[in-house]
Amino acid sequence: MNAWIERQRGLIDTTVANLRRRKARNLGLFMAYVLLVFLLASVVLFGDGMRREARLLLEGAPELVVQRLTAGRHDLMPAQWLQRIAGLRGVAAVEGRLWGYHHDAAVGANLTLQVPKEAAPAAGRVHLGATLARLRGLAPGDVLSLRDHAGQPHAFVVEALLDSRSELVSADLVLLGEADFRAFFGIAAGLYTDAALRVVNPLETRTVAEKVLARLPATRVISREEMRRTYDAVFNWRQGLPLMALSVLLAAFALLAWDKASGLSAEERREIGILKALGWDSGDVLAMKLWEGALLSLLAFLLGYTLAWLHVFYAGAPLFEPVLKGWSVLYPRFALAPEVDSSRIVSLALLTVLPYVAATLVPVWRAATLDPDAVMRE
Amino acid sequence: MIELVGVGKTFNPGRDNEFHAVREVSLSIEAGRVTALRGPSGSGKTTLLGLIGGLTRPSVGRVRLQGRDISALPERFLTALRRDTFGFVFQQFQLIRDLSVLDNVMLPAVPTGRPHADIRTRALRLLDEVGLGRRAAARVQWLSGGEAQRAAIARALINDPPVILADEPTAHLDNVLSRQILEILADLRRRGRTLVIASHDPLVFETDLVERVIDLRDGRVLTVHDRSTVPMDKSACRP
């Protein structure tokens, strides 16, 4: 065992000395490798982080949302419909929700106005999302002026700003009281934007959804699972854009690595011949090259991944933020919760390390199995 | 100690460029003596040295080391034999560029699994012995011809092999440097090592170093001279 360890140590020493020999070439390859892993891991970590945030947010969402449709379009729901839904077996609670969009010319963005379920602001007062407050230059105590459905200005006193931890969804949010909401949008009492349902048994969500549709055919029922899938699809799609751009870089790196790894120069071939003549067997040569490939690619992977992790979780992913968060006018400021996903690390490592090591070994194996006497005859 | 029986080596057999480098060579090389393979370029000296040292396998015939047939050994065993029994000094030095002299000398010992510190200590001692102690950290391409050949000799000795095979050890060296190398080889002989030297340099044969000369031409053995019994015929020495 000791001899085996000493042998590996000797091979590693020789490998390191070898890597130092072609410093510029190996450093160039190493930097390209680090850059590739960094970009790839940044996109993956960011996408994963966003999906995780979305899932966490959805945990508090209702199991089902029912919306009235008129001519295939979303329409306001009468309060009587809520009663009809509440009467269905399996429904634990139904709640009419009030929310809507308003285009704010001052910031050139659509705001979401919503009546919260609990702790609604008093009449004439609002709670603002941090991004909107920042853009409008508002602080608690200031006045937010918006034009209502009839074009009349409404002045709201900013009572509080929403917690910046929820900025991903609260960037453009304005919370207000029910009476203010109805007056602002001109929605009569007894009408709601949609209905949120809690079911008795989460396993029967689909059955309850079918019952709702059977009783109220002019509705659409959206489950939390469907919302989660939509978020996933959106983030997957967005993640695909930078990955597509990265594929060019990936291809360039693959060519570089293949050229370095697979094309043994005459010099390298001669050196393998010398080693064999000096008593190295094919296994020793392969082991040394394996160490060379593994050291280079593993170090590059670790450095690239660590940089990507810092880039995404501590620097806010400035390189990909505009693409991955979307094209919203209001860019929310939020930090993704740092997380280390071992399966993701392994899959990224396999994707970047294995092909390189494999590409290195094949030509070396071919050279290492040749007769060493060519060295004598040179 | 080393015995060749009806050994022949053919390169590219069956092709247009088929070439018989060694034909029907039978000879024995005694342990602890210095044997020289002499002959003009293309006479088969280097190929014969490679066959003796297990660098290549004979196309026909047998090579025996202390009675054991090594010509049919699997590659792994042949490699181990090359590592432990033979030390090679190649014609073009065959040092690895950009590695230090010390790293080059240590190379043959890497697969042995001996402790790294031991290998390093021995390598430094050998470099001292050949007068290169101060050049241990230098890259090999900075060495002069004489220094490179001494580094190659130190490398050949790192695994303490009983047999040294030297291919044209004085080629590319002037007389002064050649004599230095021959002195180092003579010292190895005094320490009981077996030396087989392939050379056509008259300088090698003018010294008392060589005890036995095997003349080769066209891959065949012409004559075998033993200096202890038959006076040397130096007219055969041609560059």
Image (cartoon, coloured by chain):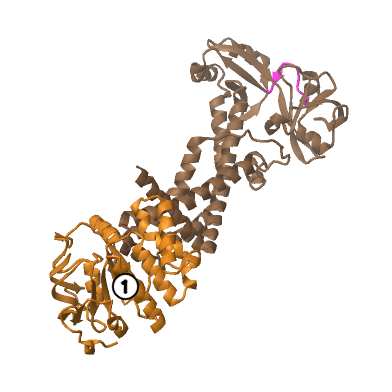
Chain colours: A brown, B orange
Q: Position of residue B50 (x, y in %)?
A: 25, 69
Relative to A180, residue B226 above or below: below
Q: Quadrant of the N terminus of chain A?
A: top left
Give SS at disc 1.
helix
Relative to B145, residue A158 above or below: above
Which residue is drawn at the image coordinates 49% and 48% (left, top)? A298
What range is drawn magenta here?
Answer: A185-193
Relative to A181, residue A298 above or below: below
Which residue is drawn at the image coordinates 49% and 53% (left, top)? A296
In-image side of A67 versus B114 (left or right): right
Figure quadrant of residue A277:
bottom left
Where does label 1 land, which residue?
B186
In-image side of B152 versus B226 (left or right): right
Q: Position of residue A33 (x, y in %)?
A: 53, 54
Q: Is residue A189 magenta?
A: yes
Q: Position of residue A64 (x, y in %)?
A: 58, 21
Residue under mark 1: which chain is it in? B
Classed neighbour count for the residue bearing mark 1: other residues with Cα under 10 Å, few (<14), some (14–19), many (≥20)? some
Q: Position of residue B74 (x, y in %)?
A: 21, 56
Q: Quadrant of the C terminus of chain A?
A: bottom left
Figure quadrant of residue B37:
bottom left
The answer to whether residue B213 of the structure is visible from this angle is yes
> Which secondary structure type mostly characterizes the magenta part of the structure?
loop
In-image side of B13 versus A353 (left or right): left
